[in-house]
Image (cartoon, helix red, strand yellow):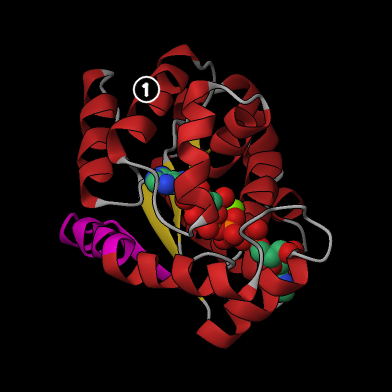
């Protein structure tokens, strides 16, 4: 059953009671865990803004901007783009955006980014509501990324770079989960079921929150 069928009031809430869905979700997880796929579902169902730093960086690369040319070097090597570049890029997006809150996809990826995001939101009287962390075994991550590489055109969708991205995740990004766990905001979600099953679980966590504040 779709969440909007189970909770028909969700659409109504989106349109008429925006405060109830002032919801800032971090969708967390390693490369290939399904953040982009599930963000699309969440955005469609709950009317949130989607902020993917990977998409923003690929757009900069495609337009060959100075930021894009600089970022491409790190992205092609499976390494993180420097914090100051990413933080500078997202601040204006948060400031200039209308709507009901965000799904942060692929951001924050370091503790410095997480602290900067907390500060940016706090300055607007907002905060991260919840962090849902997709858990997928490493062999499945590689399988998905290599498989996506057959059609994505992404220069980092190959086994060699995928393994570097996963190593970078363990070294620099995994501590972000502990950062949010200390704030009592982290929930792990099995991400190796079908897309629909995983969305059902994610939606369940979101709706539990909606039910609490409604
Ligand atoms: P980014 O674009 O953010 O990539 P990523 O996190 O490395 O992860 P992916 O986009 O590869 O995977 P995903 O979790 O979104 O999974 P998806 O839904 O696509 O970052 C790219 C690069 O930019 C980084 O390496 C870094 O250099 C730089 N960068 C970005 N943000 C940064 C930041 N904040 N700081 C510093 N540097 C940054 O799914 C993957 C595949 O699996 C798809 O083909 C999908 O169809 C499939 N799939 C999804 N779910 C399922 C399922 N349940 N079952 C089977 N297949 C599935
Ligand atoms: Mg992605």
Quadrant housing the N terminus: bottom right
Q: Nearer the viewer, residue 14 or 144?
A: 144
Question: Residue visible at 47% across and 56% down?
Answer: 208
User: Is there any visible trace of residue 202 in the rendered image?
Assistant: yes
Identify the image quadrant of residue 52.
top right
- Above or below: residue 95 compared with residue 104: above
Q: Crowding at label 1, few (<14), some or many (≥20) Cα neighbours within 10 Å?
A: some
Q: Is residue 33 above or below residue 58?
A: below
Residue found 66% across the figure and 24% down from its top: 63
**Place of residue 56 in the rendered image (x, y in percent of width and height, measured from the top left):** 56, 33
Q: Is residue 185 magenta?
A: yes
Q: Is mark 1 within 8 Å of ligand 1?
A: no
Outermost residue on the left side: it is 182
Find residue 133 and report its horizontal and vertical position in percent. 43, 65
Would residue 50 be found to the left or right of residue 209 on screen? Answer: right
Membership of 206 in magenta stretch: no
Question: Is residue 21 shown to the viewer in this render?
Answer: no
Q: Secondary structure at mark 1?
A: helix
Foreground residue, 166 or 205? 166
Q: Which residues are magenta?
A: 172-190
Counting from the top left corner in percent of width and height, residue 138 is at 51, 83
**Closer to us: 44 or 27:** 27
The extreme right residue here reads: 151
Q: Position of residue 53 (x, y in %)?
A: 50, 39
108 lies left or right of 98: left
Q: Give the residue at x 47% y 26%.
A: 67
Residue topped by disc 1: 91
Residue at the image point whose x is 21% and y is 64% from the top: 178
Which residue is at the far top? 96
Q: Is residue 133 left or right of residue 54?
A: left
């Amino acid at each position: 059953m779709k969440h909007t069928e189970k909770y028909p009031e969700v659409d109504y809430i989106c349109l008429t009671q925006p405060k109830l869905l002032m919801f800032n979700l971090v969708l967390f997880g390693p490369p290939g865990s399904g953040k982009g796929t599930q963000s699309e579902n969440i955005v469609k169902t709950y009317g949130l803004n989607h902020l993917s730093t990977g998409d923003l960086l690929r757009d900069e690369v495609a337009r060959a901007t100075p930021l894009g040319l600089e970022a491409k070097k790190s992205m092609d090597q499976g390494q993180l783009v420097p914090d100051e570049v990413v933080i500078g890029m997202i601040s204006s997006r948060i400031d200039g955006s209308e709507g009901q809150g965000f799904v942060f996809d692929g951001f924050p990826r370091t503790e410095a980014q997480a602290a900067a995001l907390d500060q940016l939101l706090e300055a607007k009287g907002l905060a991260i509501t919840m962090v849902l962390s997709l858990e997928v075994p490493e062999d499945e991550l590689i399988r998905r990324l290599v498989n996506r590489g057959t059609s994505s055109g992404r220069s980092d969708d190959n086994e060699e770079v995928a393994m570097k991205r996963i190593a970078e995740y363990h070294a620099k990004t995994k501590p972000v989960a502990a950062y949010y766990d200390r704030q009592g905001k982290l929930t792990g979600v099995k991400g190796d079921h079908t897309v629909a099953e995983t969305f059902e679980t994610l939606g369940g966590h979101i709706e539990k929150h909606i039910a609490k504040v409604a």
